[in-house]
Amino acid sequence: MTMKIALGMRLREGPWGGGMQFGKALANYFGERGIDVLFDLHDPDIDIILLTDPRRSSQSSAFTDADIAYYLTNINSRSIVVQRINDSSHSRTADFRSRRLAFANHCAHHTVFISQWLQDVYEIDGFSFIEPVVIKNGADRSVFHDFGGRIWDRNEKLRVVTHHWSTNWKKGLDVYLEIDTLLGQRPYSELFEFTFVGRVPEDVQFRHTRVVDPLTGSHLADQLRSHHLYVSASVGEAAGMHHIEGALCGLPVLYRQSGALPEYCSEFGLAFDEGAISVGLLNARDRYPRLKANMSEYPYDATLCCSSYHALFRELLAKREAVLSRRRWTRLNGWIFRSYSKAFDIVIKGYDRMSS
């Protein structure tokens, strides 16, 4: 019998966040293997439900934790729910983010974190998740590869690039503005070029940086390959996809010592300390040949990521009875859970409005 998976995402075309790239990769991977991938909870025979974002206000969320609780208590009690945790309040301005994701975990039988750092952060903050494991993100290697990439011969400026869809300041805008300032003075103006691909906040103005509108797919990959070095200055990054795409294109990563960036980049780039991007750029330039030589070994691609989910789903279904015994509600407290979930989202929506 074919496995049926409900993926809790509305897939969208064009530039979007890294989570959307994950959703597309997972849907393609399972579809190519003849596995049914659904994007709603209408089918009464779903085997695996993957919850990616419980917020009903999210434009990319196909269903919420409340929807899942209703499905389990009224339609199919034998579905297994896996919650993917890809964010926390540490990388956002919304204080409720971690609490909202932790609350949603009450409808799950298993939890996937996208980095060990993220799992540790939740544990340090006092949250408990059911059966946690780590599966790292990965990008499409057929698109993001180093074939035809620009080779630095030391006679030209070292071309540095980053890309972000979000305009959140915690994506590293403080550092990118500092790089912009450095490029207005020697020796940086003679040694480096910097390109920012993505959306720029209205209150940010670059003076010495080349800004490119958001790109996706092969257009983005071509842009990345036209550079030599990738920089990521994200704060509290749960994992991200941007630096993965850069690394798969053969670019060593100059990364901030924050969040999961060291976990993904430590063997494939160079870290810079807080307030030391100026030194980091010069060090990366000096060590570039050695850094570049290791990039062909970068492992985090979509095949590794998706095959890990596939293996997890098979394992859970093979011991379905034991997994289902983890369920933490009856029909009555399932109703209470759904009510609290909806109320939680109303509170968060109001908080976000007040904060904006």
Image: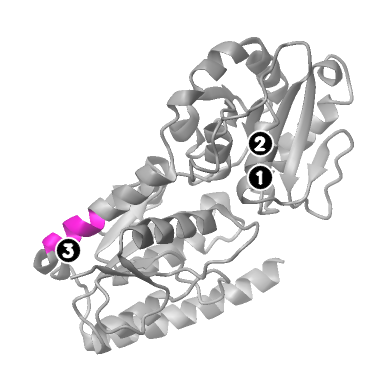
Where disc 3 sits, the SS reads helix
In space, the residues marked 2 and 1 are separated at their CA atoms by: 6 Å
| Residue type, label 3 | Leu
In space, the residues marked 2 and 3 are separated at their CA atoms by: 40 Å
Where disc 1 sits, the SS reads helix
Q: Earlier in the sequence, mark 1 or mark 3?
A: 1
Q: Mark 2 packing: few (<14 Cα in 10 Å), some, or many (20+)?
A: many
Q: Which residues are magenta?
A: 312-319
Q: Are the residues flagged by discs 2 and 1 in contact, CB closer than 8 Å?
A: yes
Q: Which residue is mark 1?
A: 220
| Residue type, label 2 | Leu
| Residue type, label 1 | Leu
Q: Are the residues flagged by discs 2 and 3 in contact, CB closer than 8 Å?
A: no
In front here: 221 or 352? 221
Residue 341 x %, y %: 42, 78
Q: Which residue is mark 3?
A: 317
Q: Earlier in the sequence, mark 2 or mark 3?
A: 2
Q: Nearer the viewer, mark 2 or mark 3?
A: 2
Say if 279 sits above or below 261 in the image: above
Q: Residue at x 15, y 65 (%)?
A: 323
